[in-house]
């Protein structure tokens, strides 16, 4: 799809952040950070500007040097409007004093990861994975998601990813580690094999691509322990992270730099597609402009993958910690046919990774028979989008399944402590139009 | 209940409460004997006789029959009339008796008769019970003759009534219509046509 | 700049109902051309009249009930075409018209249109025609495979569909390759037919006819009337095979056996489906 051009990071060179960044105070699954700065304050690169110790929270840091222009609600790529800190650049590169760790201990690693506010691609703060359970026996890094691999697995980054794996193993107390690579991606596995000199780290090959929302399924595939939607891979004894998480861990522990940059691949209807290293908070518009701008009229802007990604309302949304891909669809690529009747061709049944009957459930949901949907195990759906991809009748399968799940939550009245809503929209009971997967009884 | 008129009750049995198309009762003899118009008329006539007789009796005795034993009582009354018509048909119309066969004694369990006895004759005066029986019987007659006519016409190419060839159309007869499958199909299509307006009104209103 | 915000996913594979139907129609058109060569122009007339009647019926019904016309997706054409192929070439031309009307109006639209039919419309119409005018729709000769060349042009075929098994085999394999029909039903139907025939002791050259290949690749895996669960399709294929051989053995007519088999199997498909629902992968057994 793209060629990889990762810009060398030198502190003196001017980054592509442009004039202003918008740092949302909620870039993870958990509670919103409270701002630590006020309007007109001066901030440096890497300075912590928001945190909240009352619950699950990953602190946010400034990615440029400048002063705070405003703290107000701004558009967020995943959930409506979130309180954000708007910083105007002063064109310098003054940073805080970083303190790297040499030969860190387990507690050093956990502290560094927590202070750096590292958020994995699934949205979970990474330190929470390291501290929740005592018994983790394997650390898995998922290298099958194309967006993640294209952005973060350039050959220069491979030693850092391996280093990140070792740090995660030490930080969690796991004895083994494994990279999960797609069976046909020979080049990546050979590069990793050549740089790997540790007997405790292996390479597993799988035959499908697993996006971050399919983490439970990947954990089941590797360990053989079924992980239902109310649990996470931690319950199967594994930590499942991604290349971007591993890179951020390496930077945080070895160099002391918090999670303030991301590698983003821009593809689709732009003049110069490729991978760019951008500061967190840069608007999508600037990232696309640095890729040559739009070629033609854009129809849809999608973040993080065409099957599971979120469509954006405009291009002013900021890049957040879990952004790895921006896809621009031109107006004639946008899907707009009206759905037809289900012809029971069973193509959706053949591709469903969880073994349910998506077409049948969607038909029941269309007619409002939600108790039938419950009997057909609708709550096992992980919303991967494969059924929608193959349906010849253009039916909106994923959307109908989501409606069924939401209605079932209302009908079955799951107690409050089990049905945690989507982060950010604390009272939202409707299926998130911006695309966050909603799995009743838990969140992805 | 307040404004029942004789004409109203009679026509209700034919159109609004047609036993085959609206109440969907008594389909078993309907499907079985409508292979020709002659058989249909015979069955409808026999059922009409039993219906009138049993309605009159049940209505006359309705205050004497204790509610807890009413079903066996109704069956006894109906059996009486069925036996009468059975013997009469065996004596006076032997070919029709042969054609209808087992379905004459089976009028006993025809749901129309016990249904009307329970739902109407048990609660109304003799006058209205007779009118209701005549109406329902007429409705049954209309339905049976319609189905029988279609099946016989398409299945044998002509309608023969008591030795008189009424209509004859120059088609290749479709044997399927004489078989049970044709019966189900004809009833299905006719029921859809009869109830089409009702369904359309309900859908518009709902 | 107006951006569309819609629910994931944002791309599709591009397979539509039109593509599936028209590929099947293309295969059957090749078959009908070969049958026109073998049987003469009468065969072509039967096919054309049948297709025309089916299309006109569908257009008429959809106009009368004020729905939008869906002739373009090829379903009416497919029904008319299959129904014509099940008739002998000497049939009177009004029979396919009546059959096409029955199939499209009563079996397809009265049950709810595309995707809601309980029986395959072409098969149900054929059963109606066979039971109504059996003498006129019977075939005049019984085919059998006397050698490998019979796979190309069959010796003794009585109905239009039996002329060339090779077209159906190649076309069917193409459909399986493109995943327009699934592979379980054709494979299992063929295997269980052969196994059952060997068990009963019947000569394979009578059992494997051109109609069997039509049944395997076009009639039995029809999406609407076959079960949607994977295990269900397995069982359905095996059931079809067993029924074909049993019916053919008892009535000495393996051609009609295929058609009645598909008819009976369609009747039990919902039952098979209901009892083979899969268990989701990530449910912890409570």
Image (cartoon, coloured by chain):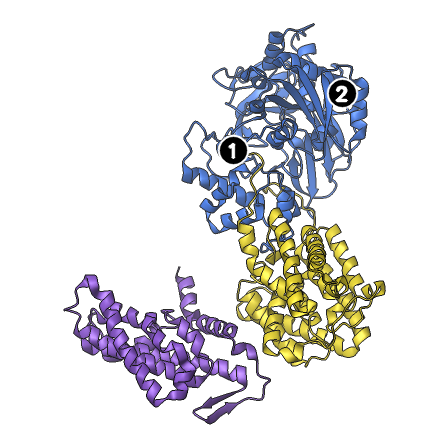
How far apart are the alpha carbons under marks 2 and 1?
A: 42 Å
Above or below: residue C58 compared with residue A259: below
Where residue A15 appears, x then y in whole percent?
72, 21
Above or below: residue C4 compared with residue C250: above
The answer to which quarter of the image holds residue A115 is top right
Where residue A335 appears, x then y in whole percent?
65, 48
Colour of the chain lettered C: yellow
Residue in the foreground of this view, choosing between B70 and B94: B94
How many dots with numbers? 2
In the displayed structure image, the side of residue A90 where residue A7 appears, left or right = right
Quadrant showing the C terminus of chain A: top right
Where residue C132 appears, x then y in whole percent?
59, 77
Above or below: residue A249 compared with residue C238: above
User: Which residue of the protein is positioned furthest toward the left in this rendering?
Assistant: B64
Q: Is residue A17 visible?
A: no
Colour of the chain lettered A: blue
Residue in view at x 65 percent, y 12 percent: A170
Residue position marked by numbered label 2 in the rendering: A157
Q: Which chain is purple?
A: B
- Residues tagged by mark 2 and mark 1 found on one chain of the structure: no
Residue position marked by numbered label 1 in the rendering: C285
Chain letter behind tag 1 = C
Chain letter behind tag 2 = A
The answer to which quarter of the image holds residue C170 is bottom right
Where residue A390 appears, x then y in whole percent?
66, 47
Residue in view at x 43 percent, y 78 percent: B33
Nearer to us: label 2 or label 1:
1
């Amino acid at each position: 799809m793209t060629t990889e051009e990762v810009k060398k990071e030198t502190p003196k060179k001017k980054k592509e952040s442009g004039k202003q960044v918008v740092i949302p105070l909620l870039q993870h699954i958990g509670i919103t950070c409270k701002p630590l700065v006020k309007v007109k304050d001066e901030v440096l690169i890497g300075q912590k500007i928001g945190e909240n110790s009352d619950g699950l929270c990953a602190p946010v840091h400034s990615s440029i040097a400048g002063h705070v222009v405003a703290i107000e609600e701004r558009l967020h790529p995943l959930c409506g409007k979130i309180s954000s800190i708007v910083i105007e650049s002063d064109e310098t590169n003054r940073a805080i004093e970083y303190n790297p760790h040499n030969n860190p201990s387990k507690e050093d690693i956990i502290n560094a990861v927590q202070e750096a506010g590292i958020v994995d691609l699934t949205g979970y703060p990474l330190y929470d994975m390291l501290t929740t359970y005592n018994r983790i026996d394997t650390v898995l890094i998922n290298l099958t998601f194309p967006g993640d691999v294209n952005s973060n697995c350039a050959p220069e980054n491979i030693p850092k990813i391996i280093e990140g794996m070792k740090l995660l193993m030490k930080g969690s107390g796991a004895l083994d580690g494994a990279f999960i690579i797609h069976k046909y991606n020979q080049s990546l596995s050979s590069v990793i094999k050549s740089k790997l000199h540790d007997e405790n780290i292996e390479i597993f090959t799988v035959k499908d691509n697993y996006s971050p929302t399919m983490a439970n399924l990947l954990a089941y595939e590797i360990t053989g322990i079924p992980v239902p939607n109310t649990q996470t891979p931690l319950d199967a004894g594994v930590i499942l992270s991604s290349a971007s998480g591993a890179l951020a861990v390496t930077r945080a522990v070895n160099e002391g730099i918090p999670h303030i940059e991301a590698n983003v691949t821009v593809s689709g209807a732009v003049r110069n597609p490729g991978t760019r290293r951008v500061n967190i908070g840069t608007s999508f518009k600037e990232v696309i402009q640095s890729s040559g701008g739009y070629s033609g009229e854009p129809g849809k802007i999608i973040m993080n993958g065409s099957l599971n990604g979120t469509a954006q309302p405009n291009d002013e949304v900021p890049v957040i910690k879990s952004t790895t891909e921006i896809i621009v669809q031109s107006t004639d690529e946008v899907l707009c046919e009206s759905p037809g009747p289900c012809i029971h061709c069973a193509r959706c049944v053949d591709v469903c990774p969880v073994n349910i009957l998506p077409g049948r459930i969607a038909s029941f949901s269309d007619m409002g028979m939600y108790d039938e949907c419950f009997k057909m195990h609708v709550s096992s759906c992980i919303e991967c989008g494969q059924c929608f991809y193959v349906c010849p009748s253009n039916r909106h399968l994923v959307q109908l399944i989501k409606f069924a799940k939401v209605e079932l939550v209302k009908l079955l009245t799951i107690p409050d402590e089990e049905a945690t809503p989507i982060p950010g929209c604390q009272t939202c009971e409707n299926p998130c139009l911006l695309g966050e997967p909603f799995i009743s009884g838990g969140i992805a | 209940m307040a404004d029942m008129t004789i004409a109203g009750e009679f026509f209700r049995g034919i159109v609004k409460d047609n036993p085959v198309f609206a109440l969907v009762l008594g389909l078993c003899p309907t499907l079985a004997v409508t292979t020709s118009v002659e058989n249909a008329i015979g069955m409808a006539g026999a059922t009409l006789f039993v219906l009138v007789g049993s309605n009159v009796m049940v209505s006359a005795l309705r205050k004497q029959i204790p509610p807890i034993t009413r079903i066996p009582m109704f069956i006894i009354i109906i059996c009486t009339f069925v036996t009468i018509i059975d013997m009469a048909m065996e004596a006076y119309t032997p070919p029709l008796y042969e054609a209808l066969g087992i379905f004459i004694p089976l009028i006993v369990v025809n749901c129309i008769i016990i249904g009307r006895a329970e739902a109407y004759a048990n609660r109304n005066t003799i006058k209205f019970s007779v009118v209701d029986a005549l109406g329902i019987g007429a409705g049954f007659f209309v339905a049976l003759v319609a189905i029988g006519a279609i099946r016989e016409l398409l299945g044998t190419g002509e309608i023969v009534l008591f030795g008189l060839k009424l209509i004859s159309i120059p088609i290749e007869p479709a044997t399927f219509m004489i078989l049970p499958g044709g019966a189900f199909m004809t009833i299905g299509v006719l029921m859809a046509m009869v109830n089409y307006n009702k369904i359309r009104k309900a859908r518009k209103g709902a | 700049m107006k951006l569309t915000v819609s629910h994931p996913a944002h791309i599709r594979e591009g397979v539509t109902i039109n593509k599936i139907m028209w590929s099947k129609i293309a295969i059957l058109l090749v078959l009908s051309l070969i049958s026109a060569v073998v049987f003469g122009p009468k065969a072509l007339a039967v096919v054309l009249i049948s297709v025309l009647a089916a299309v006109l019926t569908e257009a008429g019904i959809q106009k009368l009930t004020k729905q939008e016309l869906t002739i373009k997706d090829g379903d009416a054409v497919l029904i008319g075409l299959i129904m014509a192929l099940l008739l002998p070439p000497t049939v009177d031309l009004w029979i396919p018209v009546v059959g096409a009307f029955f199939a499209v109006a009563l079996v397809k639209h009265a049950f709810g249109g595309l995707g809601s039919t309980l029986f395959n419309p072409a098969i149900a119409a054929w059963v109606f025609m066979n039971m109504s005018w059996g003498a006129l729709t019977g075939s005049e000769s019984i085919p059998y495979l006397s050698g490998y060349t019979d796979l190309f042009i069959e010796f003794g075929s009585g109905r239009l569909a039996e002329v060339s098994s090779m077209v159906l085999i190649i076309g069917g394999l193409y459909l399986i390759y493109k995943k327009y029909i699934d592979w379980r039903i054709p494979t299992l139907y063929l295997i269980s037919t052969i196994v059952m025939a060997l068990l009963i002791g019947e000569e394979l050259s009578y059992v494997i006819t051109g109609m069997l290949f039509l049944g395997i690749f076009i009639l039995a895996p029809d999406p609407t009337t076959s079960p949607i669960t994977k295990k269900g399709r397995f069982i359905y294929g095996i059931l079809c095979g067993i029924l074909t051989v049993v019916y053919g053995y008892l009535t000495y007519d393996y051609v009609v056996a295929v058609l009645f088999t598909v008819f009976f199997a369609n009747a039990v498909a919902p039952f098979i489906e209901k009892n083979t629902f899969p268990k989701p992968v990530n449910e912890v057994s409570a």
